[in-house]
Amino acid sequence: MTKTSVILAAESKIQRMKVYQSLVHVVHNVSLTQYKLWLLLLQHVKTHQPDKSDTAIHDWEISHAAINRLLGIHRRTISATVQDLQALRKTDLVINILDKDNRGWQSFFSFIGEFSVNKKDALIQFNMPDALVEMVRSNDESLNAMFLMLNWSVFSHMSNKYDAMLYKLCKDYEGIGQTAYIEIARLRLYFGMEDTDYTRVNNFISKCIKTPIKRLNQNETVDIQIDTLFQRQGHKIHSIKFLISKKENVSPLPLFEPATLHPAFLYSRVAYSLEEQEKLLAQFDTIEIQYTIKRANQYIDGLKEKNKEANIGGVYNKAFQECWGKDIAEQRKTAKRTQLQVEQEQYGVREKKEQEQKRREKREQKARAQREIQIQAWQQLPADKQTQVKTVLLQGLSAFNQSFARSYFEQNNWELLFLKFRQEMQQAMAQVKEQETISGKGRQPENSPMQNKKSTGTKSKLKAVSAKMGAGVKTSAISVVESSVVLSDEPPKGSISVDEIAFKKAQINHFTNGEIDEAALKRNLNAFSLLRSGSITLEDFCLVTEWVIERG
């Protein structure tokens, strides 16, 4: 017999588990399946000697098939088990959370230690924290007295976490018939709840205490009956005491191998062989089987409430012959499709709103960037120029708007000024600039003979200048103006001033919608050097920038 078959044979005989009582009172911050897996590994540690051979990677080895058999999970992949083992290794374990042994000590470590997986042979080797190994393998009489007999057949078939945790807790106190009063906060910790789970006490008691207890008491395979006493502080429930009694006439669970149980038959009260399950699965889909079993169980419960005998096998046969769950299954499928369509429509509306919001934010960001550049150009103007611009602006505004503009000037609130009067400020600055150019530089009015003469040969001159400036006329011109403001407060050679450079920068930003290419700026900083060194003239510089502005 192979090592794997020996492990399978030994594991399949487990019907009842001894669990050290402190291990019953742990923080359940893992899933129910992960907790069941952990209990199985503890039982394996207790019943098997550690492997200390040179070929062993870790102390204990168990087959994946044995885990599936004991968990009662059909066709569970080894990858899913590995994910659960990883969660157990990474999660902190708090021992003796309810302090039943009155020692006052709580212990903190991982659920399991390191582990390795052989996917080819479907074997798992693992280590346990030393403290856990000592607990489950100790021969001390005082420790052995703390062991609990847990009916694994019942526990392993529970699919609700709170059902299983309450059953395990109350089973521990079955001998004395009641627990002490346990505070709500400590119960929440025992269940492994987050702070955001069932924050209202009434919801917690309804969902995590009353409903699970009702299911346990109605479950004919559960061997204990549970009642509760509540202790209040004022009007608020503060603590809960559980009263436990042995249930009479308990129906034993079907004696079939757990590994052969398909999830569709999880709540079946009739034991179906593997062949019978496969036959029904070929005839019905999983959801139809689940709802047929549910309807059959409801019918049986209804007969019992009326004190009538129920032939469970006969009811199940009729339920499957007439497929009692087909209508409900179809309704659920339709509802699921409808819900999916609603979710898709809601997602489309939400996505459209999000896209519109992004576009709006982008427009606002762009407008804000333009205002900042214009404000910067305004602030760089000398005081006399600012006065001229203010005068021109106020002359062009209505009396109503003049009061707003004056208050913005008095408060130096340039943000609101350019937000409300951006276009008017731009026109006023351009008008003052034009007047300065005509009077200060002798610039001729438009369409004058001098202006027409200057335009002669524009194309050829632009071509020559752009060749000197590198990457392209438009980009280089922007870079020149941008560089002149960034690199120096001094005017370049010639008669152009700092405020003129700032003004041209604002103009170019306006006509290019503020989209200055920062990468191009860094590549073409040499263009400003050409201007300062005299390689290109101020006339060429102005010609290029004006050409860019005229063509947007």
Image (cartoon, rainbow, N blue to C red):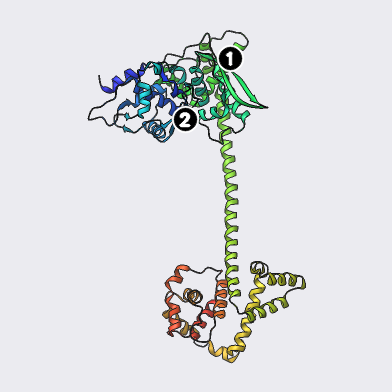
Q: Residue pushed farthest left?
A: 54
Please state the horizontal and vertical placement of residue 205, each as a whole percent of the image. Answer: 60, 26
- What SS does tag 1 mark? helix
Q: Residue 136 location in percent, x, y?
A: 37, 22
Q: Is residue 11 left or right of residue 539?
A: left
Residue 131's spot in the image, x, y percent? Answer: 37, 27
Does residue 517 lie above or below 265 as drawn?
A: below
Q: Which residue is mark 1?
A: 301
**Can residue 145 be seen?**
yes
Of all residues shown, which one is farthest toward the front? 103
The residue lying toward the viewer, choosing from 15 and 169, is 169
Q: Residue tagged by mark 2?
A: 31
Indicate the quadrant where residue 210 lies.
Answer: top right
Image height of 518 relative to 97, above or below:
below
Instruction: Name the residue nearer the viewer: 205 or 240.
Output: 240
Q: Is residue 285 visible?
A: no
Q: Which residue is found at the position 56% from the left and 10% from the top?
A: 310
